[in-house]
Amino acid sequence: MNTPSTSATPPADRKQAILAAALAVFSSKGVDAATIDDIRQHSKASVGSIYHHFGTKEAIAATLFMQGLDDYWTGLIAAVQAAPTAERAIHGLIAANIAWIVANPDLARFMFSRRQAVSTAHEQAVKDCTSGHFKDMLAALKPWFAQGILRRLPHELYSPLLLSPSQELVRSWLSGRSKLDPRGAVDELSRAAWLSLACDPDLHGSRTTP
C-alpha cells in the first residue's frame, strides 16, 4: 500500500495510508509503545490529518482491527455462499481462513493480539462487529441446518469446532514455532470439522443446497 503525502491525496487514500503505516509501526513496536508521531513519520501524513481521521492512537488501532475483521469475514462468508455442498462449504471456510492469514501475516498477528490491540473504549464495537459477521456466516450455512445435514448445536460450539484448530495452527506458524505451511493442512482440518458437524458425514457429503 502506498503512503502518499501530497495535499492532493484523496481523503480515503490518506486514511488508508495512515492505517498501513500504523500497522507497520504496531508490528515493529507494539501498540503500547507506538506513538502518533511514529505513525506520522511512517505515513508522511500531518498530525492534523491523523487527528482529523482518527482522533487517537486507540481509534486508529480499533479502525485497523475492524477493517481487518470485515475483510477476513467477507472472504469466509463468500466461500460458504459459493459452495455447492455442506462439506465443500466447510472446506471453503477453513481454506479461506488460512489463506487470508497467510496473505496478511502482520495484520493477522495484530488481530491475534486483541487484548493489547483494542482499548476498552472500543472493545464493545469490536465484539459487535465480530458477532455480526459470525451470525452472517451461520446464516450462510442455514440451508444445510434446515436439511438436517449439519448438526444443530449451541452457537457457542461452532467457532471452536470450525475454526479453533486452524487458528491454533496458524498462530504457531505466525510465531515461527511451526514450519508447516498451514495451507497444506486444509484438507485434514476441514475433514475433522466435517466429521464433527455433519449429522451423517458419509451420507450427506455430496448433497447440495436447493
Image: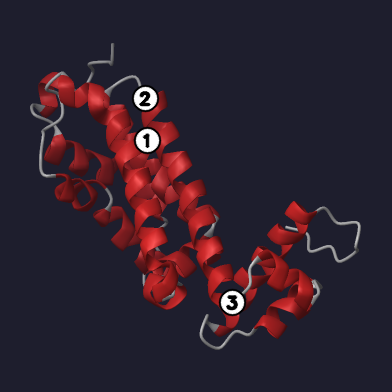
Mark 3 Cα-neighbour bin, 10 Å: few <14, some 14–19, many ≥20: many
Which badge, 2 or 3, comes first in the chain's sequence? 3
Point 40% across, 52% down: residue = 129
Point 53% across, 75% down: residue = 58
How far apart are the two marked residues, 2 and 3, measured between alpha carbons?
40 Å
- Image position of 91 (left or right of 47): left
User: Does residue 176 appear in this view?
Assistant: no
Residue type at tag 2? Ala
Point 22% across, 39% down: residue = 191
Point 25% across, 55% down: residue = 165
Residue type at tag 1? Gly
With respect to residue 66, does 146 lie above or below? above
Depth check, mark 3 against mark 1: the one in front is: 3
Residue position for label 2: 83
How far apart are the two marked residues, 3 and 1, measured between alpha carbons?
35 Å
Q: Are marks 3 and 1 in contact (CB under 8 Å)?
A: no
How far apart are the two marked residues, 1 and 2, measured between alpha carbons?
7 Å
The label shown at residue 92 is 1
| Nearer to us in this view, 120 or 184 | 120
